[in-house]
Image (tube, rainbow, N blue to C red):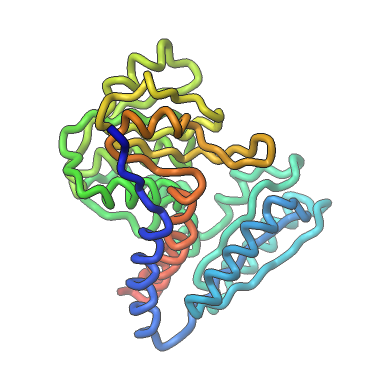
Amino acid sequence: MSAKIIDGNKIAESLKQGLKSELEKLKEKLVLVAVQVGENPASKVYIKNQKSSCEEAGIIYNLVQLAETISESDLIAEIEKINRDKKVTGIILQLPIPPHINSRKIQMAIKPEKDVEGVTPENLGKLLYADTKPTVAPCTALSVMECIKSTGENIKGKEAVIVGHSEIVGKPVTLMLLSSLLDSATPTVCHIATKDLATHTKRAEILIVAAGIPGLIKGNMIKEGAIVIDVGINCIKNKIIGDVDFDEAVKVAGYITPVPGGVGAVTTVILLKNLLYLYKTQIGN
């Protein structure tokens, strides 16, 4: 068998259309402020993509560029200044930031109602409430859920294995899969200390891989007909590959996301959807 490809670009385009019609109804433009510390080359690519997507959607995108030598306290002061600006709808902290700064502390300085990435303790905490839809959640985790949803498969009671337990993918995806709003799956979380990973992955009807290890999951580790969501983005010999060996997996899985063109393609649109949710919350809608 050959898996059906989950086309992230197609999902993103569909989400864009819905987002565009909602944005056109608004009386004012949304404002997204990106905070960059230093000039990391990887951040420049993300900033370019974010700016382009915002301009296409009619959203104002402002970049606040700060010196790499800025102190942690001065950076927090900058964030607090943006927090107070009533014209700003949402704030995004561009990672990575210099090692002398605690990124978690900076993320926590962002007001929850302006946290477009859904990474503050308050917004992450809302995921624990199974019967309430959070205002925002981490963009990559939401992108994973959109990719699963696009298959049209009922996930109720299905065995879901998540490889990776980060705060922006593994943990939030696990909580989303448990949400009664989505007819709960039965998730298992695997990580670096998990023994015999293949034992877990081979029983997964839904397999989500976000380990940051290129080609970690081979074809013989996948259950036939499974939904395979590859979140990994690794650059090997100038080629972008995922955490799943695509050539092997595509012969076994029922559905699979490619890399690139899968989960990553959906993430920027989710960021803008989060921004719209923040705006609605701010105006009490």
> Is residue 165 at all visible to an observer of this figure?
no
Q: Is residue 32 above or below residue 241?
A: below
Which residue lies most toward the bottom here?
27
Q: Position of residue 207 (x, y in %)?
A: 34, 32
Task: Tell me if 162 is positioned left or right of 260 in this view.
Answer: left
Locate residue 119, reporting x and y percent: 48, 49
Measured as percent of width and height from the top left, residue 273 is found at 40, 65
Where residue 276 sits: x, y (%)?
Answer: 40, 70
Q: Is residue 95 above or below residue 54?
A: above
Toward which corner of the image does residue 201 lie, by quadrant? top left
Front residue of 156 and 32: 156
Q: Is residue 265 left or right of residue 181?
A: right
Name the residue rendered at 59%, 37% in the picture. 234
Query: From the viewer's perspective, is 87 left or right of 204?
Result: right
Quadrant location of the C terminus in the rendered image: bottom left
Left or right relative to 129: residue 10: right
Residue 131 is at least partly visible in this image: yes
